[in-house]
Amino acid sequence: MKPSVILYESLPADLLSRLNEQYQVTEISALNAETVAEHADVFRHAVGLLGSGGKVDQTLLDSMPALKACSTISVGYDLFDVDALSARNIALMHTPTVLTDTVADTIMALVLASARRVTELDSWVKAGKWTKNIGPEQFSIDVHHKTLGIVGMGRIGKAVAQRARFGFDMEILYSARSAHKDAEERFSATRCELDELLKKSDFVCIILPLTDQTRHMIGAGQLALMKSSAILINAGRGPVVDEQALTHALKEKAIYGAGLDVFEQEPVPAQAELLTLPNVVTLPHVGSATHETRYAMKKDGVENLLAALSGQTDKNCVNSSALKK
Ligand SMILES: NC(=O)C1=CN([C@@H]2O[C@H](COP(=O)(O)OP(=O)(O)OC[C@H]3O[C@@H](n4cnc5c(N)ncnc54)[C@H](O)[C@@H]3O)[C@@H](O)[C@H]2O)C=CC1
Ligand SMILES: O=C(O)C(=O)CO
């Protein structure tokens, strides 16, 4: 009998058949307490777990004594208890390379849409309000030649810097725990403290992972440092920004606007005050969600799981250094 793998995200037929060649695959609708209880026996025997969006914590691991590898169809892995996985010698695989450019494109879309009021004016035109020549009420602000501050100068941060520098002639500032000489050389990026970045930037782009250190890194105090003409973009994880403080800053016009792909609670509740504000552009966490990139992520996810289950964790493994070979 083939060893068992649990799949909690749908796969295209070609990728599913690659898994099926070697493993008995059980597909579940989502990873949660109900599906774990429903398929308790499969969870007890499964050696692999593939999907995205479910919490993989100690409670889940206790129900999976045979688990050898998890493969998340995402680059972010904040839903995983990495220490608990490493303590059990379970590999955690992710998809860090295939989505970088797509997410950077989404971030530039948020920069442009929020600065040039694309969605707001689109609604205005469609509502039949364009009845005479436009005036200053419809004017917006320039993106080109402005200063972009990047908080999270990793793979995606650098891809954003590249677009901003060479596509829009923007000055690039970044704040980071250590210097990124490659970004300084390629994009003439200047490293500075977070406070200075917030004070000087016309656009503040947050593309950080969610960790104990980054949770609410941007709160009322940080927003107060930003220029009243500046725009905040968050495409990392929602809880990095204190949403209540952001709502207040936008309402008071303490900052010009925001572009958000991620929220403290997802899906963002329909009654959230944030959604009533004209100076915020919202997306439903679609940073990587193009047909091409979502296929590439799923392919990576399958290949990562197959590799990890055959003992290969040299590529795309979050906790390779903690694993006993
Ligand atoms: N909106 C979306 O659909 C997507 C969101 N993401 C999010 O973006 C994050 C970043 O992705 P990548 O650029 O591929 O990751 P990365 O690991 O290449 O970059 C993250 C950067 O943040 C820095 N960082 C971490 N903690 C920090 C701290 N406390 N202070 C300052 N800098 C800190 C790291 O040193 C690194 O340079 C992911 O972890 C994920 O949460 C990623 C893909 C899609
Ligand atoms: O990969 C991630 O971390 C996402 O948020 C979705 O692509």
Image: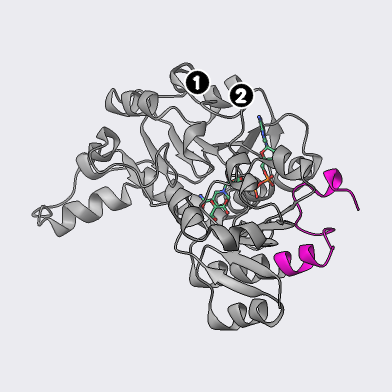
Left or right of residue 280: residue 237: right
Q: Position of residue 198 (x, y in %)?
A: 54, 25
User: Which residue was labeled with disc 2?
Assistant: 194
| Mark 1 CB lies closer than 8 A to ligand 1 | no
The label shown at residue 267 is none
- Residue situated in front as seen by the camera: 64 or 226: 64
Cα–Cα gap, marks 1 and 2 = 9 Å
Q: Position of residue 108 (x, y in %)?
A: 50, 51
Crowdedness of circle 1 by 10 Å Cα count: few (<14), some, many (20+)? some
> Label 1 amino acid?
Gln
> Is residue 285 placed above or below 50 in the rendered structure?
above
- Residue situated in front as seen by the camera: 47 or 147: 47
The picture quadrant where one finds residue 175 is top right
- Residue situated in front as seen by the camera: 250 or 142: 250
The label shown at residue 222 is 1
**SS under mark 2:** helix
> Label 2 amino acid?
Leu
Q: State the residue at coordinates (64%, 45%).
A: 62
Q: Position of residue 235 (x, y in %)?
A: 50, 45
Q: State the residue at coordinates (25%, 48%).
A: 120
Q: Are marks 1 and 2 in contact (CB under 8 Å)?
A: yes
Magenta residues span 304-325
